[in-house]
Image (cartoon, grey):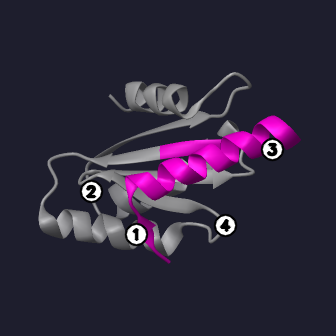
């Protein structure tokens, strides 16, 4: 599995928006941000995320400390469950301080609206 950059993520987000508008497919976007990260903390979080994401989803960095997941075919409720499992791995088992947020596609969204809503929830 691979962690992509923000440009690849945003391109795929455009594609998911188009599919959702055309076919009604749901999708969600999940963000995880490391708090006060050190290099070993980021490396551990990297390995946890790579080991626990679904092959049909896309994982990317939007900055050094923040990861985003594009969860295609996933409603927000299921994305919250997925996030809970990741938080358990990162925080409970490995004591990595993180903040996280989830949002799902809504009918009138474009990628700016989705990302703004996600970042607002993250802070």
Mark pair 1, 2: CA separation: 10 Å
Tell me the residue that label 1 is attached to.
Answer: 48
Residue 36 vs residue 77: left or right? Answer: left
| The C terminus - image quarter | top left
Residue in the image at 61% along x and 44% along y: 14
Mark pair 1, 4: CA separation: 17 Å
Tell me the residue that label 3 is attached to.
Answer: 25
**Please, what secondary structure does the residue beneath circle 3 have?**
loop
Given contact means CB atoms under 8 Å apart, are the residues at marks 1 and 2 in contact? yes
Up-down: is 75 above or below 48?
Answer: above
Query: Residue 40 placed where, x, y %?
Result: 16, 70
Q: Which region is colored magenta? A: 1-30
Residue 18 vs residue 34: left or right? Answer: right
Residue in the image at 14% along x and 48% along y: 36
Residue in the image at 23% along x and 63% along y: 42
Tell me the residue that label 2 is attached to.
Answer: 96
Q: Which mark is residue 56?
A: 4
Mark pair 3, 1: CA separation: 28 Å
Could you tell which of marks 4 and 3 lies nearer the N-terminus? Answer: 3
Up-down: is 113 above or below 75?
Answer: above
Could you tell which of marks 1 and 2 lies nearer the N-terminus? Answer: 1
Could you tell which of marks 4 and 2 lies nearer the N-terminus? Answer: 4
Asked if residue 84 can be seen in this view, the reply is no
Query: Residue 16 placed where, x, y %?
Result: 68, 47
Up-down: is 122 above or below 87?
Answer: above
């Amino acid at each position: 599995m691979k962690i992509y950059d923000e440009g690849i993520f945003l391109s795929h987000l455009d594609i998911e928006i188009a599919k959702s508008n055309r076919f009604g497919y749901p999708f969600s976007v999940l963000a995880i941000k490391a708090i006060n990260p050190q290099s070993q903390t980021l490396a551990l979080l990297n390995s946890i995320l790579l080991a626990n994401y679904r092959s049909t989803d896309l994982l990317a960095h939007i900055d050094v400390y923040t990861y985003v997941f594009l969860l295609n075919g996933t409603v927000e409720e299921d994305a919250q469950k997925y996030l809970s499992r990741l938080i358990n791995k990162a925080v409970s088992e490995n004591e990595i301080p993180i903040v996280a947020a989830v949002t799902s596609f809504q009918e009138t969204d474009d990628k700016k609206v989705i990302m703004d809503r996600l970042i607002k929830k993250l802070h």
